Amino acid sequence: MELCDATIHELHDQLKKREIRSVDIVDSIFKRIHQIEPRIHAFITLTEERAQKEAALADQKIKNETDFHPLLGIPIALKDIFLTEGLRTTCCSKILDNYIPPYTATTAKNLEGCGTVLVGKLNMDEFAMGSSNENSCFGVVRNPWNEDCVPGGSSGGSSAAVAAGQCIAATGTDTGGSIRQPASLCGTVGIKPTYGRVSRYGVIAFASSLDQVGPITKDVTDAAIMMNALAGYDPKDSTSLNAPVPDYTKALLPDIKGWRVAVPKEYFMEGLDPEVEKAVKKSVQTLEGLGAIVGEVSLPHSEYGIPTYYILATAEASSNLARYDGVRYGHRNRDSQELLPMYQKSRTEGFGSEVKRRIMLGTYVLSAGYYDAYYLKAQKVRTLIRRDFEGIFKNYDVIVGPTSPTAAWRFGEKTDDPLKMYLSDIFTVNVNLAGLPGMSLPCGFTNSGLPIGLQVIAPYLQEEKIFRVSYAYEQATEWHRKRPSHLKM
């Protein structure tokens, strides 16, 4: 196996034994990037010179230390929604083309503090609005398992880069499934933590009551290592939770005998691909074989998740994106002589079609005469959805089901039908609405060789339960070991 295809913990063990150096890992990463990036297009900005310097510094630290952080010298990449001081951050929108932030996001700083090596900024759906990574102003990202298919979104660049060995791990953001869904479609592990568990300071906002930061990795152990670095209270983020953060790696135990696992009947609905259904049901049987007690439950308000989400998320997007007016920063139309035409032309030129659609939807549901009928009602339904989960967690440790109703689809297959595209997040949005943690991990492949993801959901602030069950499942299967080997040249 090439170094770029290894996991964080595998590389850390080799670094500790002085069998490899960080610069060797970086060389392997950039060799892979230069080989396949023209085909995959996962990156917006590469930082090769910076990465080599950071790797050399990491090697100096490793030489002088016997016990060092598991992330020291590990090459990672950041979704291009994380602000990085002095390094272009665009959110894959023309309105922020060539924007250079004056400060760095807390999560990016946390990773720097652990000694990670930054290899670049990753492609994504514009302003994190999308489920396929077809909405980036820099072009689409291709799925490493089948380049004719989408990688999922909005963190499509993050998941594709990890799956393809273009970085060892990556950051993503999840507003309605944007970490878990691309993880499912690309065969990686992605966790959306409890809302407020990870700082959002310095992360460009889409929907502030839903956005959450998390890692995308090659296996569950790596996800726990990354979460140890990312989680924690941040006084700069008003929504950050001031709660103790456990060592998530201590939850990585293979024994789940007697654990209670809920399977919602609503997750096996019309529209679920038969191959996905088969793989997920087989995964549930595996958990039973490990001693888990499985029970069928009901989440009766599940069907209202998509309309509720697309009212609340677009309303918040309408407010958050009002700041891009062509005055303070970002794209500005230079032909207008008056203020209002300048606003209109700057935003018309700067925003893509999906972003415009969501701004208009959000503005509509917040407008006079419609606020109570749409926004207020959606908030009430959100409460009902949260209570559904709370009721189940009185008797069960975790909920499991499919992450996505289908495996990856071909480019253009859903772009002409926004509703069809939105429904690809039907199993993920409710977790965001409830503020709960959820993870997607590989659980099989379709007959055509596309990955399938299993979603594990836990109660508020109980990510350790997700890690325990996911690790046990992972150790009993081989799906996480598979790589898209056809990419090697």
Image: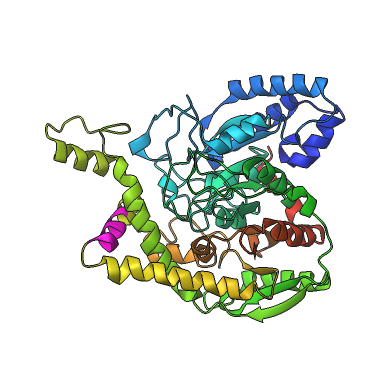
Classify residue 244 as left or right of residue 80.
right
What residue range appears in magenta? 359-367
Q: Residue at x 62, y 53 (%)?
A: 191
| Secondary structure predominantly adopted by residues drawn in magenta | helix
Q: Is 369 one of the magenta-colored residues?
A: no
The reply to whether residue 352 is visible in this rendering is no
Residue 222 appears at what percent x and percent y? 72, 45
Left or right: 323 in relation to 119: left
Q: Position of residue 49 (x, y in %)?
A: 59, 20
Q: As displayed, is residue 363 above or below residue 64?
A: below
What percent of the width, then of the height, locates residue 250?
Answer: 79, 50
From the top left corner, tell me how far across and down residue 111 is, in percent: 63, 34
The residue located at (87%, 30%) in the rendering is 17
Q: Quadrant of residue 312?
A: bottom left
Q: How many marks?
A: 0
User: Where, quadrant-wise, is the C terminus in this rendering?
Assistant: top right
Residue 274 is at least partly visible in this image: yes
Could you say which quadrant of the image residue 395 lies in? Answer: bottom right
Q: Residue furthest left?
A: 337
186 sits to left or right of 379:
right
Q: Is residue 323 above or below residue 455?
A: above
Relative depth, front residue between 252 and 168 = 252
Q: Magenta span has 360?
A: yes
Q: Which residue lies at the image location 82% right of the left edge and 61% below the top edge? A: 476
Q: Nearer the viewer, residue 394 or 126?
A: 394
Residue that extends furthest to the right in the rendered view of this protein: 17
